Image: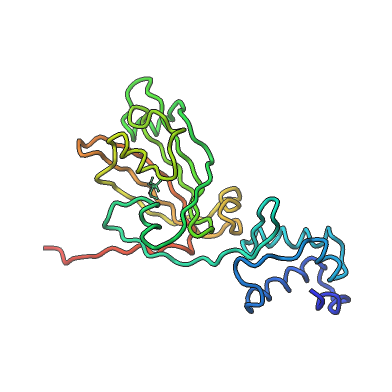
Amino acid sequence: FRSLADAKGSNAPLYLQLRKSIEEAVRDGVLTPGDALPSERDIAIKADISRVTVRKALQNLVEQGVLIQRHGSGTFVAPRIERVEQSLSRLTSFTEDMARRGKLVQSVWLERGLYVPSPQETMVLGLTANEMVARVNRLRFANEAAVAIERASIGASLLPNPEAVGSSLYAALAEHGNKPVRAVQRISAANLGPEDAQLLRVPPGAASLNIERVSYLPSGKVVEFTRSIYRGDTYDFVAELRLAE
Ligand code: GLP
């Protein structure tokens, strides 16, 4: 950060100069994923600029996904996003997919509980009159990087107690004897709106893959209607194709 003091006098606003010097340190490997940054105060003293300027630069880098902030413990270089190859021919859960790759799975709850269903939920899930819907909405992390937002809806008759879902929705469904055996999945490209972008720690407008999964019980009854938003720079979907007979 000392170089910033030398660079003073350049025309760019100071917070942009600081932002650039941190970006360069990350790009050149001087700072690596997981490294802690000095405190705002220390950076301000070293670079001879105000704390407000430091805060603005750090905030900006958090919004860009270069840094992450953990409440109470400071600012760190964001984990590197590793691309994941995901087969399109097997019905698996996020937890199973990540465990197979040796990645640490974490989820943050965005919403969970029983709700009056939307017309779309009633239709897709084939809910009976007055049946509530269990919503299990989560931000999902692989090796500490936020990779997906998943909004799952399940009929209350199949998941009466969404509050009791632990780290895996499919494990909770299996406990009720309601694990899906078949699913139809639709994948489309989109750009992230400001709120979802903030959750996934990428700039607004960044590319995403939106995945809609409708999964079924052996009886043919729909279990799950899930809308997932994956970071566009994270997933490669792979399917094996065979020559049509
Ligand atoms: C995948 C699917 C979701 C499904 C989820 C369950 O991510 N796209 O439709 O709800 O897995 O994952 P878990 O059992 O880890 O909660």
Residue at x 59% of width, y 56% of height: 201
Q: Nearer the viewer, residue 89 or 142?
A: 142
Q: Nearer the viewer, residue 176 or 244?
A: 176
Please give left or right for residue 10 compared with residue 128 in the image: right
Residue 35: name its quadrant.
bottom right
Q: In this view, does 107 lie above or below 30?
A: above
**Quadrant of the image for the C terminus?**
bottom left
Q: Is residue 173 above or below residue 79?
A: above
Residue 67: name its quadrant.
bottom right
- Where is residue 195? Give x, y as percent: 59, 48
- Where is residue 29? Give x, y as percent: 62, 77
Residue at x 75% of width, y 65% of height: 38
Residue at x 66% of width, y 59% of height: 62
Single out the residue that lies furthest toward the left. Answer: 245
Please give left or right for residue 60 compared with residue 43 in the image: left
Please give left or right for residue 210 compared with residue 145 in the image: left
- Where is residue 198? Give x, y as percent: 61, 52
Please give left or right for residue 23 compared with residue 92 in the image: right
